[in-house]
Image: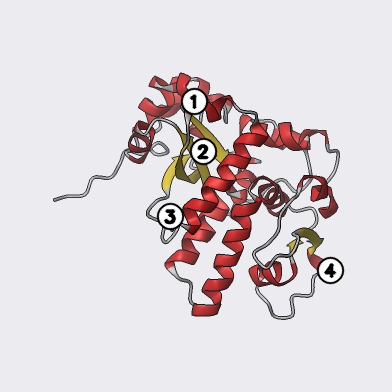
Amino acid sequence: MKRFTPPEQFQVTSLNTGAFAHLRQLFKIHQQTDWPEPAYFAPYLNAINANNLPVRFIDDAKVDFAERYYEQVIFETGEVPTRQQNWHDLFGGFIWCLFPKTKALINQRHVDEIAVHGLKQRSKHRNALTLFDECGVVLAISDSNWKACLRDHQWKTAFIMHREQWGKTIAPFMFGHANYEMLTKPYIGLTGKALFVNVPDEIFCKDLVTQYQYLDQRLYEMIKNDDCLADNKQLSPLPLLGVPGWFEENNNSSFYDNTDYFRPKRRTRK
């Protein structure tokens, strides 16, 4: 399989699809003419790490790692090493702005796991944290039927039959910054990992900032109190190009006929 490579240059045309609508609305990213500097995030960022230090973005080349792992640097200094002219780190910055409490908790959990297992041995918990951090999609749902439907890969039911319910009883919120990076050059096969978060109906009527604040708190509680990322079991495959509003071609229902992408649930034999 050919290794994915994002666009080499910063270009707002890569951010035109519906998947980037939240970033355009909240950060006006489409108005940028060139790569943002790390300081670009400062007005949007209000994060304190678990070591009670304010989080800030620093040019990766100026960070003294001193043999420390990336997550250890963030925990010990509050500095997030940020590579210049890099889509992956750019989107990572947006996620820190949108989910500051959850990101700080995930950072703490990584450091705690490293203290127990070291850098070479990755626990199930740390694998789940990384998978969600890179590929996670928060699916806010007020109707519990969505969880069973999507976990059972009933794609046409979810994406076609109940399409009008997206934004009313279910709404997607990107968490994985690697998802954003790959969506700059979307391709068939692009799949994220959904985590379902139960929300009251009225959340869908709130403004976008309030929705993110609510979800950040809920995610924080789910990870800290319910241990929902103890392993990968709570994460469910989600074909990202099938999400209504995220990819123009899915306006045609025949788009979902591709069973190599929208795969049926594999049944286990009894």
Q: Earlier in the sequence, mark 4 or mark 2?
A: 4
* Residue at the spot 35% in from the left edge and 41% down from the top edge: 151
**Quarter-of-image position of residue 238:** top left
Q: Which of marks 1 and 2 is nearer the N terminus?
A: 1
Real-space Cα distance between discs 2 and 3? 22 Å
Residue type of the residue flagged with mark 4? Lys
Say the numbered circle drawn on residue 228: 3
- Residue 9 shown left or right of residue 67 in the figure: right
Q: Which amino acid does label 3 sit on?
A: Cys
The crowd level at tag 1 (other Cα within 10 Å; few <14, some 14-19, many 20+) is some
Whole-number angstrom distance, CA of label 4 to CA of label 2: 35 Å
Residue beneath disc 1: 166
Say whether residue 130 is left or right of residue 163. Answer: right
Question: Which residue position is annotated with label 2?
Answer: 240
Q: In this view, does 210 lie above or below 176?
A: above
Marks 1/4: CA distance? Answer: 43 Å
Image position, residue 148 (x, y; %) = 33, 37
Residue 153 image position (x, y, % from top left): 35, 37
**Mark 2 residue type:** Leu
Does any portion of residue 118 appear in the rendered image?
no
In terms of depth relative to the viewer, which is nearer, 25 or 270? 25
